[in-house]
């Protein structure tokens, strides 16, 4: 029996079907987000390599020494996500018809912490996983019905931003920098409506990126430094987003605060 064209894996993975693969990575998440009422998200970025306290304990000395002082960020990401998700669980009472979710890259490390905090709060969360040869594997804390695996980075990025009301970047490497600087560029160039962007752990970010020097050289404008803020505790980060999201939606929807 001849395989139907839309079930033929050789065809679907071939060059001729590239546009179909891209379209599928747009239409499938879109359908699921509509089905489950996803209207608003806060996206958590951060390193896949930062272990949980349990992971640190089980590393048996194999953990890179540079990661040891960063374990606290896993725990703080869990707590931030728990606080935000607890608010999100009652979001509909303040903004009827809207649902707020934590969204992560779906993998280990800080991504796991984000989904874990939402789970601890009894809430659902989104996982936008990506197929990679190393590091990336799906964590067990995201909601299965809101978990997706992408082949294309650019489609995954689209869905990070589609319903995004804000992002928080915890310490991370190339992947975190890629996502953070893309969002900053989108907002700077007004391709994305201005959203609250939070860098968590000012000591880390000041050490690894000297943003003011970019302004000194004229490579960015002075007011571009106002595109992002800092937080050092889960409570501070939660209050930041609660205030910014509430203000934005109140203005947008004409809702009384």
Image (tube, rainbow, N blue to C red):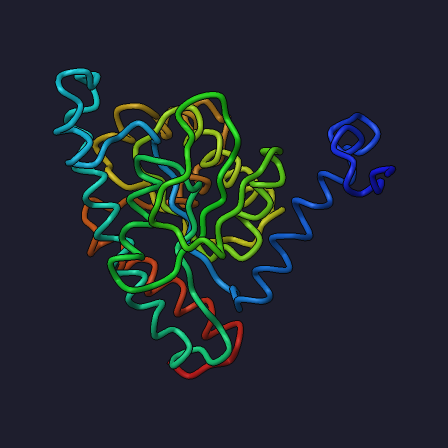
Tell me which corner region of the image, top left, top right, bottom left or bottom right, holds residue 34.
bottom right
Q: Residue furthest right?
A: 2
**In the rendering, at what x and y percent does residue 58 appear?**
15, 27
Of 116 and 218, which appears nearest the observer?
116
Against 146, residue 229 (above or below) is above
Against 105, residue 144 (above or below) is below
**In the rendering, at what x and y percent does residue 174 appear?**
43, 24
**Could you tell me which quadrant the N terminus lies in?**
top right
Image mark count: 0
Residue at left 33%, top 46%? Answer: 229
Residue at left 72%, top 38%? Answer: 21
**Could you tell me which quadrant the C terminus lies in?**
bottom left
In-image side of 221 versus 18 (left or right): left
**In the rendering, at what x and y percent does residue 203 appear?**
21, 32
Residue at left 49%, top 26%? Answer: 218
Against 56, residue 72 (above or below) is below
Of 147 and 224, which appears nearest the observer?
147
**In the rendering, at what x and y percent does residue 249 appear?**
47, 70
In-image side of 170 versus 10 (left or right): left
Residue at left 80%, top 25%? Answer: 15
Tell me which corner region of the image, top left, top right, bottom left or bottom right, holds residue 239.
bottom left
Tell me which corner region of the image, top left, top right, bottom left or bottom right, holds residue 76.
top left
In-image side of 87 versus 184 (left or right): left
Q: Residue furthest bottom?
A: 256
């Amino acid at each position: 029996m001849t395989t139907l064209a839309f079930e033929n894996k050789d065809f679907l993975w071939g060059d001729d079907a590239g546009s179909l693969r891209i379209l599928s990575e747009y239409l499938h998440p879109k359908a699921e987000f509509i089905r489950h009422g996803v209207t608003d998200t806060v996206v958590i970025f951060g390193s896949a390599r930062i272990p949980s306290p349990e992971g640190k304990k089980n590393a048996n000395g194999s953990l890179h020494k540079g990661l040891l002082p960063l374990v606290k960020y896993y725990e703080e990401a869990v707590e931030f996500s728990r606080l935000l998700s607890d608010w999100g669980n009652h979001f509909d009472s303040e903004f009827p018809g809207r649902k707020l979710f934590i969204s992560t890259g779906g993998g280990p490390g800080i991504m796991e912490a984000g989904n874990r905090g939402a789970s601890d709060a009894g809430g659902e969360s989104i996982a936008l996983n990506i197929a990679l040869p190393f590091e990336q594997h799906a964590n067990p804390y995201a909601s299965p019905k809101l978990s997706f695996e992408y082949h294309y980075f650019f489609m995954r990025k689209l869905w990070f931003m589609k319903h995004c009301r804000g992002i928080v970047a915890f310490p991370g490497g190339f992947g975190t920098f890629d996502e953070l600087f893309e969002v900053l560029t989108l907002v700077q160039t007004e391709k994305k409506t201005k959203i609250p962007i939070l860098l968590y752990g000012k000591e880390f970010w000041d050490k690894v990126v000297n943003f003011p020097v970019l302004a000194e050289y004229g490579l960015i404008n002075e007011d571009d430094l106002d595109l992002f803020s800092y937080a050092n505790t889960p409570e501070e980060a939660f209050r930041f987003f609660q205030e910014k999201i509430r203000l934005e939606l109140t203005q947008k929807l004409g809702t009384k605060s």
